[in-house]
Amino acid sequence: MADKLLQVRGLNAWYGESHILQGVDLDVAEGEVVTLLGRNGAGKTTTLKSIMGLVGRRAGSVQFRGGETIALRSDLIARAGIALCPEERGIFASLSVFENLMLPPVVAPGGLDVPTLYELFPNLKERSRSQGTRLSGGEQQMLAIARILRTGARLLLLDEPTEGLAPVIVQQIGRTIRAIKQRGFTVLLVEQNFHFAATVADRHYVMEHGTIVDMIRNADLANAMDKLHDYLGV
């Protein structure tokens, strides 16, 4: 694959004595949107956290822009240009929308400025002075994504961004992912809803028992539905 931004080989991860990831291999090219699909407990979220160095112990190879990051602390991985948007969103309740938005440091040029973020997320402009506790779940998700887009990170790790959101908000998140792809951002996305994933992604990796078992291109998704239903149990 040309222009690999992220290359993961033989990634293993542990929480205490629990061996969660067992040799994960995946690639993400510059400008791609790639999803991790799989049943609950397959290791999808742990893969994102392992790429960020947020697990108890990890081994293998994680190369970002050709540089090895497996031995780096998570703060140095973030400063290299990788950003994680966790499922729990991490919005600070005591801070306003604008204060939450400005909280992370800029790590590189190329991030989106506040007026551009407000164009992508009009709700945030309207609620800029509201405290985090006053936001709906959908608005919190928008804020969590907007916050990392400002930092200049080029690889965005999004963990279940549509979980529990109303269909109209899911559609807005989808439009946002497509828009930031057009701006040159790269996205690795954990998603349970493969119908949503099909509207935004170029490729899909399927995980089972802590490893990658298949890769399906979005163009081939229609022909792979029976296989995908077997993998996902839906």
Image (cartoon, helix red, strand yellow):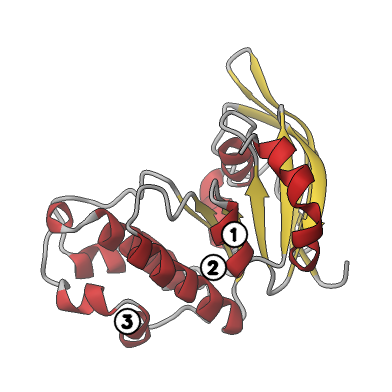
> Mark 3 and mark 2: span between their CA atoms?
15 Å
Q: Position of residue 47 (x, y in %)?
A: 64, 40
Answer with left or right where residue 96 lies relative to residue 114.
Answer: left
Question: Does 84 appear above or below 5?
Answer: above
Q: Residues within 10 Å of mark 2 (few under 14, many from 20)?
A: many
**Which residue is most to the right?**
1
Looking at the image, do the residues carrying marks 3 and 2 touch, with CB atoms under 8 Å apart?
Answer: no
Residue in the image at 23% along x and 51% along y: 92
Q: Which image quadrant for residue 49?
A: top right
Single out the mark in the foreground, 1 or 3: 1
Q: Residues within 10 Å of mark 3 (few under 14, many from 20)?
A: some
Q: Look at label 3 and name its amino acid.
A: Val
Counting residues from the start of the chain, the first of labels 1 and 3 encountered is 3
For the residue pair 225 and 88, the one nearer the viewer reads as 225
Q: Position of residue 194 (x, y in %)?
A: 60, 53
Q: Residues within 10 Å of mark 1 (few under 14, many from 20)?
A: many
Q: Look at label 2 and name its amino acid.
A: Ala
Residue placed under numbered mark 1 in the picture? 197
Circle 3: element type: helix
Q: Look at label 1 and name its amino acid.
A: Ala
Counting residues from the start of the chain, the first of labels 1 and 2 encountered is 2
Residue in the image at 76% along x and 46% along y: 226
Answer with left or right where residue 169 lies relative to residue 228.
Answer: left
Answer with left or right where residue 218 lies relative to residue 119.
Answer: right
